[in-house]
Each structure stands twice: as C-alpha cells, then as structure tokens.
Image (tube, grey):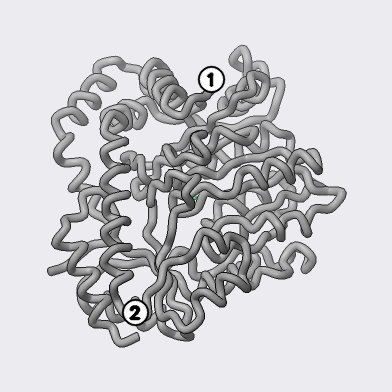
Amino acid sequence: MNVPLLDLNAQNFPLEAELTAAFTRVLHSGIFIMGPEVTALENEIAAMVGVPHAIGVSSGTDALLLALMALGIGPGDEVLVPTFTFFATAGCVSRTGATPVFVDACPVCFNIDTTDAARKVTARTRAIVPVHLFGQSADMDAVMALAAAHGLRVVEDAAQSIGARYKDRASGTIGDFGSYSFFPSKNLGGFGDGGLLVTRDDALADRARLLRTHGSRPKYFHSLIGGNFRLDPLQAALLRVKLPHYATYTRARQANAAAYTAALSALPGVVAADPAHCKCLAAHDRATAGASMILPVAYPHNEHIWNQYTVRLPRPGARDALQAHLKKEGIGCEIYYPRTMDRQVCFADTPESSRRGCEVAHRLAEESLSLPIYPELPAAHRDRVVEAIASFAF
Ligand SMILES: *Cc1c(COP(=O)(O)O)cnc(C)c1O
C-alpha cells in the first residue's frame, strides 16, 4: 500500500461539479482581472478571520513583499526573521533592499525564539516577521511586546496558518499585516499560485491596494512604484468553492494529528514535546534526553491547524534513516526544512552578526521529518504510517 504525502485529487474531485460551474461563471463573465469574484473572496476571508481589509494577491510570497513595501521597508533597514522557515520569508526582505537578520527557533514549536530576537535588535531594526510554522502560531504576545518596545512593524507570515488561532485571535490578524498563501499544498489550497494580505489599518490597506496595481490611481498616474501583485478572478472563484468546507478540512487534519500522537506515543522511545518548555532548550533537552523520537505538540492557548505533522529524531543520522525506511515502504514524507536561512548560499554576504546563534534551528534542520496529514488521508493509510515507523529500528 503506497501512502502519498499529499493527495490533492481526494479533496478536489468531490467538488468537480461546483468547480466547473465556477469556471463557467468566470468564463461567461468575461472579467479576467480583478472584479467581483476577487472582491467576494476578499470579503469572505476578511469575515472568516475578523479583519476589515483583505487584499487578494498573486502568491503568499507577493503578499509578504507587498506588506514590506507598504510599510516602507528598504535599504539600510534590518528585519528580524526566523531562520527555520520557507525561503520566501527572508527572500522578500532582501528584495526590498533591507537586510534579513536570522533568529533562532523554539525547540518545542519550531517558531521564532523571541528571546533571541530581542538580542538581535539594533538601531536599524525596523520590523519582525514571525512565521506561524506548520499551522501553529508563534508567541505573538512576546512578538508584539518586543515590537512595542522598539517601535517595530510586524508582518505575520501566516502562509501555513490561515484559520489557526492564538488566544482566540485569528492567525495573521495581530500584527500590522498578515499574509496567507493558497499554494496547493497549503491548508486552503488553490489551483495554481495565489495569496492574500490582511490588515486592520485603513491607511496601510489603501497603500497595499495601490502598490498591488503599479501604484496607479487613477490608471496611468503613478504615485508609488508598485508592481503587478493581483489575484486572478478564476483563482478566487475556485477558492470560493472550497472555503465553505475549510472548517471540515481543518477538523480532519486535527483528528489525524491526534490519532498520530496517540498511536506514536505508545511506541518505545517516543515522547511528545512539552509546551512548558517553550523557548527553553535546556529544559526541553532534559525532558527528551534519550528519546528516539519527539512528537509535535499544540500549545493550549493555540488552535493548531496542522499544515504539517513534524516529528524530530534527535539521534545523529536517525532522521535520514527513517526517511529512507519510509520511502522504501512506499510512504511519502518530506523534510521541512533541510537548510536554515542563515546557511543559504544566497545570504552568504549578509553580515556575520545577522547569522550568529541559531543552534536550535540547525538541529531542527537535521532532525525534522513531516508525515502525511492531509484532511482526506484514509485511516488505513495513517495506520500504515504508524506501522512503518514501529518497524523502524531507531
Ligand atoms: C508557502 C510559504 C510562503 C510562500 O507562499 P507562496 O504562495 O508559495 O508564494 C511563504 N512563507 C511560508 C512560511 C510558506 O510556507
């Protein structure tokens, strides 16, 4: 029995009739740039996450870039980013001309270590970009406190966490901006590239909307240098078919995570991370000493939406061995992420001071492995994954 990491068809095919109808609606409308489908998706997501402004854009990457541009981040500025993340978080900072400053990770939730972030603030620091990795919010109280203390702007990279909650607030709605991605493997997966930017601030929303279309208002009169960051109405129409099902998808991911945790924690040498050890490497290491596998955990104050179920194998070489074992067994799995940003070739010329002290993140890059968790994952496939892990000689 082969178990793929992801099966998009299992989610899309049951919606085929509705998706086809949405396509036909757009075809017949003759409107292929912006228009009512984009506005409707923006309004529906704004209502879902509880913000006044949602701005549909061309990708999650462009959402981040647009947010940084709207905040006026540029050359001479430093921006704090987690080093354990997808490239776009840091890449967008560099594309504005600013310098990304790489921050270590929390060993429990993999998110930005705000204690390390505080150590890396300088007179040039202008913003911080927390990422809510794998579907769980970063410590936003600590992020907002740090931002308030140093006058920093906050852009939440919520590409993996649309619909997640932090202390009853939607992920992406706490900072100045929040960015979402509709990349097909994200929790609200589209049919190509797409993204969305949200904010509570009227002036920032206006600026982002202006920059989304070449900074022009009216057409051909440019007050700012923007770009083409628009979301296609076809993409919006198709996403609107999925949106009413989104809560169901999330519950299925949560059920899969709970089932994995119950089954895997019964195996010898497997322990779950302890939320009490957030950002405390020494306590985390003491509690997991000798463990062969560490399971992911949701903080009680978070609603985790499980974009990934990511286990850690702390023994040297064990992660790569398990990956090879699962591949041999026909089970899809993936390393998110094998190389931290501070060690990427493209960032080699950022100052050494922006790359120091990322010890936890370096370990995560060596030890992490993500298992199949998509909503439609059949229970028999999930059991097969557990069985294959049980048969692995740690
Ligand atoms: C996917 C992702 C992005 C980029 O989104 P795209 O829609 O692929 O451009 C940015 N940040 C994180 C953390 C992501 O996972």
Horizontal side of 207 relative to 286 (left or right) equals right
Position of residue 204 relative to residue 93, above or below, is: above
Horizontal side of 295 relative to 224 (left or right) equals left
Mark before the other along the chain sequence, 1 or 2: 1
Pointer 1 with pointer 2, Cβ within 8 A: no
For disc 2, the marked residue is 322
Q: Residues within 10 Å of mark 2 (few under 14, many from 20)?
A: some
Mark yes or no: residue 100 visible: yes
Of 40 and 310, nearer the camera is 310
Q: Can you give x and y, in whole percent of width and height, for residue 194 in the image?
A: 42, 37
Q: Can you give x and y, in whole percent of width and height, for residue 44 in the image?
A: 39, 22
Q: Residue at x 42, y 48 (%)?
A: 304
Q: Can you give x and y, in whole percent of width and height, for residue 246 in the image?
A: 31, 36
> Amino acid under label 1?
Pro
Mark yes or no: residue 33 visible: no
Q: Residue at x 51, y 59 (%)?
A: 275
Position of residue 102 relative to residue 291, above or below, is: above
Specify the label residue 52 is tagged with: 1
Quadrant of the rendered structure where residue 34 is?
A: top left
Quadrant of the rendered structure where residue 340 is?
A: bottom right
Q: Residue at x 24, y 25 (%)?
A: 22
* Outermost residue toward the top in this view: 218
Q: Residue at x 48, y 33 (%)?
A: 196
Which quadrant does the N terminus fall into? bottom left
> Amino acid under label 2?
Leu
Alpha-carbon distance for marks 1 and 2? 46 Å
Horizontal side of 6 relative to 133 (left or right) equals left
Q: Can you give x and y, in whole percent of width and height, for residue 208 in the image?
A: 61, 27
